[in-house]
Amino acid sequence: MNPRTDEPLIVQEVAPRDGLQIEPTWVETRDKVALIDRLSKAGFSRIEAGSFVSPKAIPALRDGEAVFRQITRRPGVIYVALVPNLKGAERALAACADELNLVMSASETHNRANMRMSCSASRDGFADIVRCVAGSRVGLNATVATAFGCPFEGPIDENRVIGIVAAYQEMGIPNVTLADTTGMANPRQVARLVSRVLERLSADSLTLHFHNTRGLGLANVLAAYDAGARRFDAALGGLGGCPFAPGASGNICTEDLINLCDEMGIPTGIDLQQLIALSRELPELLGHDVPGQVAKAGRNCDLHPVPEYIGSL
Ligand code: COA
Ligand code: ZN
C-alpha cells in the first residue's frame, strides 16, 4: 500500500445516526445535542446528526426534529439527515437539515427487511424527493447499502451496484455512498469497485461507509484511499449497525481512523485528543463498553513512565 499522503481524507461522523440507531438504551435529546455540538468542535466538516424514519422502525432516533432544532450549527459544518422516503425528506427539510442521505440497498431482500419496500418502490420515492428539493439549497446524497455483500443474499454483483449509481445520477442525485452494511467487503473488492465508480463520479462525490464487523474496516479504507476515494463515514467509539441486518456491528471507529491518518501523515483536520476524550465518555452514556481501540490504548505519543526497576539494572 502506498497512499499519497498529501491529499486530505474527509471524515463524516455518523455516530449520532448509525451509532445510536441500534442502541437499546434511550439517549436523551440533550445528550445527543451535546454529543453533536462537541463533534462539531472537534473539526468535522460533515456530521450525520440523525434520521427521519419511522419511529416504530428506529425508536432510538424518534427525536430527530428536536435534535436538529437544538444543535448549535457551526459554520462550515454540514448536518446530514438520513431519510427513507418522501415523508422523511419533508420532516428533514422542516428541521433544516443541510443534506439528505437517501438509502436503498443493492440487495432486494435487505431493502425489504430494512425499508419494508422493493428497490423499485425506494427509487420511485427518491424521484419524489428529488422533485421536492429541486430549487432548494439542500444537498442530496444516496446510499447503496449492502453494496459489498448482503447477509441474506451473499455476494452482490458489482454491475448491479454500478447500475444503481448510474440510476441515482440519472435521477439528479449528485453524491453517492457505497455502504458495507455488515462488513463483508475486502480490500481488493473495494479497490475494484471504487475504481469503477470513480469513472462515473468525482472523488468529492463518493463516500465509503465501512463496518468493522469482520475486522477489515481500516484495511478497506486504505484500499479505497489508494484507489482514489477521499470521503469516509466513521462513528465515534466504533458504534453502529443496522437493526435490520442480522449480525450487524459497529462502523469503523472514528478515533482509530484519525489515529491511522495522523500516523501515516494523511491530513483530516480532526483533533484526535478531543475525540478520545469524547469516546471515553461513551460507556457511561450507553451503559456498555465500545469497540474502538485507540481510546483504550491512547495515542502512540502518550508515553508511560519508565518502571523504576530499570534504573537498578
Ligand atoms: N417518518 C415518520 N413516520 C413515517 C415515515 C417517516 N419517514 N414514513 C412512514 N411513516 C409512518 C407512516 O406515517 C405510518 O404511520 P401510522 O402507522 O401512524 O399511519 C407508518 O409509518 C407506516 O407507514 P408506511 O409507509 O406503511 O411505512 P412502512 O411500515 O412500510 O415502513 C419505512 C417504511 C421506510 C417508513 C420504514 O421501514 C423505515 O422507517 N425504515 C427505516 C429503517 C432504518 O432507519 N434503518 C437503518 C438506517 S439504513
Ligand atoms: Zn452503517
Image (cartoon, rainbow, N blue to C red):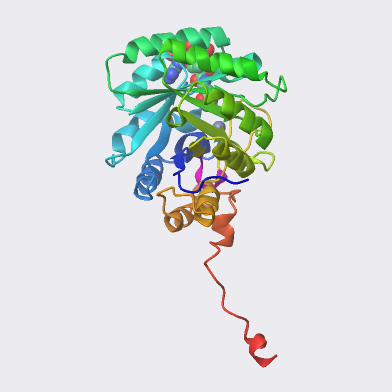
- From the viewer's side, name the closer residue of 7 and 243: 7
Q: Is residue 78 left or right of residue 122?
A: left
- Quadrant where the N terminus sits is top right
Instruction: Answer with the quadrant where ligand 2 appears in the image.
Output: top right
- Tell me: residue 97, above or below residue 12: above
Residue 225 occupies quadrant: top right
- From the viewer's side, name the closer residue of 259 and 276: 259
- From the viewer's side, name the closer residue of 251 and 231: 231
Dominant secondary structure of the magenta stretch? helix
Q: Position of residue 134 (x, y in %)?
A: 31, 13
Q: Is residue 260 magenta?
A: no
- Tell me: residue 157, above or below residue 50: above
Q: Position of residue 215 (x, y in %)?
A: 68, 43
Residue at 71% x, 21% y: name it: 152
Residue 139 occupies quadrant: top left
First to last magenta residue range:
234-238
Q: Is residue 235 magenta?
A: yes
Q: Position of residue 223 (x, y in %)?
A: 61, 39
Residue 31 occupies quadrant: top left
In the rendered image, is residue 23 in sight? no
Q: Is residue 224 left or right of residue 59?
A: right
- Quadrant where the C terminus sits is bottom right
- Tell me: residue 147, above or below residue 123: below
In the rendered image, is residue 306 in sight? yes
Q: Position of residue 279 (x, y in %)?
A: 49, 52
Residue at 44% x, 40% y: name it: 10
